[in-house]
Image (spheres, helix red, strand yellow):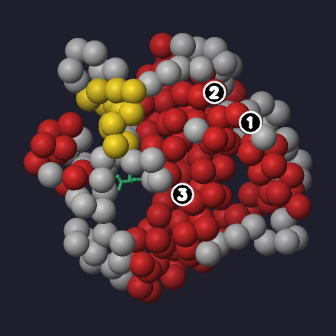
Amino acid sequence: MRIFEASTAPNPRRVRMFLAEKGIEMEYVQVDLLKGENISPQFREKNPIAKVPVLELDDGSYLSESMAICRYFEALQPEPALMGKTPQQQAVIEMWQRRCELYFMNAVGMCFQHSTGYFADRMKPVKEWGDECYTGAAKFMHLLNKHLANSTYIAGESFSVADITAFVTVDFARVIKLKMNEEYTHLRRWYDLINARPSARA
Ligand SMILES: N[C@@H](CCC(=O)N[C@@H](CS)C(=O)NCC(=O)O)C(=O)O
């Protein structure tokens, strides 16, 4: 198995963190996104959506979408459980993971792409949409701070994949100059907790 990725991009980092938590070693192959290696016909054969990460399985087939890759490894190696064990835990983690991905990570990503023109060779940046996404991401950060006043981790009292998505996004938000407000003491407490885990270096 090996993973096609880009070391500075947030989605591949989610998978690296997930695998580090599981103690799973992996071969990583770097794909140059700025040079457009991911939009080449060869790469589209691995993932028609033309994004990283992509997991190549030993049978030569490919899996993409960060959460699908994580779910595959969760099934292969259930411990430590990062996607919940009971039906309720699984649903709560899924709920928060999706919230963090849809309303935070995607908002930061879209703000980055639409305000910087980073991928202007393959999409039309719309500055107003970038601004709107910044506002959405900032609102979500505020919500997370409030939520973490009563919750040790994002999805309750155990570390989960929802923490990975939120943590990677808080770090990535630096590219749009969205920082943790000084008053966000709960978010800071949680950030330091996750940042102390060895997987945060992955
Ligand atoms: N929904 C996908 C998103 C993957 C994604 O957006 N990857 C970015 C890097 S973080 C990418 O490959 N961007 C290159 C491009 O848009 O051309 C996932 O969860 O893996």
Residue of label 1: 197
Q: Residue at x 81, y 49 (%)?
A: 192
Tell me, yes or no, if residue 166 can be seen here: yes
Percent position of residue 13, x then y: 51, 44
State the SS at label 1.
loop
Tag shown at residue 105: 3
Q: Amino acid at mark 2?
A: Glu
Give the quadrant of residue 183.
bottom right
Does 144 sit above or below residue 158?
Answer: below
Q: Residues within 10 Å of mark 1 (few under 14, many from 20)?
A: few
Q: Considering depth in this image, is 156 or 126 the residue closer to the camera?
A: 126
Does 25 sit above or below residue 9?
Answer: above
Q: Amino acid at mark 3?
A: Met
Q: Residue at x 47, y 64 (%)?
A: 109
Quarter of the figure with the C terminus: top right
| Mark closer to the observer (1, 3) | 1
Q: Residue at x 65, y 58 (%)?
A: 170
Q: Looking at the image, tell me whether mark 2 or mark 1 is earlier in sequence order.
A: 2
Residue of label 2: 21
State the SS at label 3.
helix
Q: Residue furthest left?
A: 41
Q: Considering depth in this image, is 148 or 174 the residue closer to the camera?
A: 174
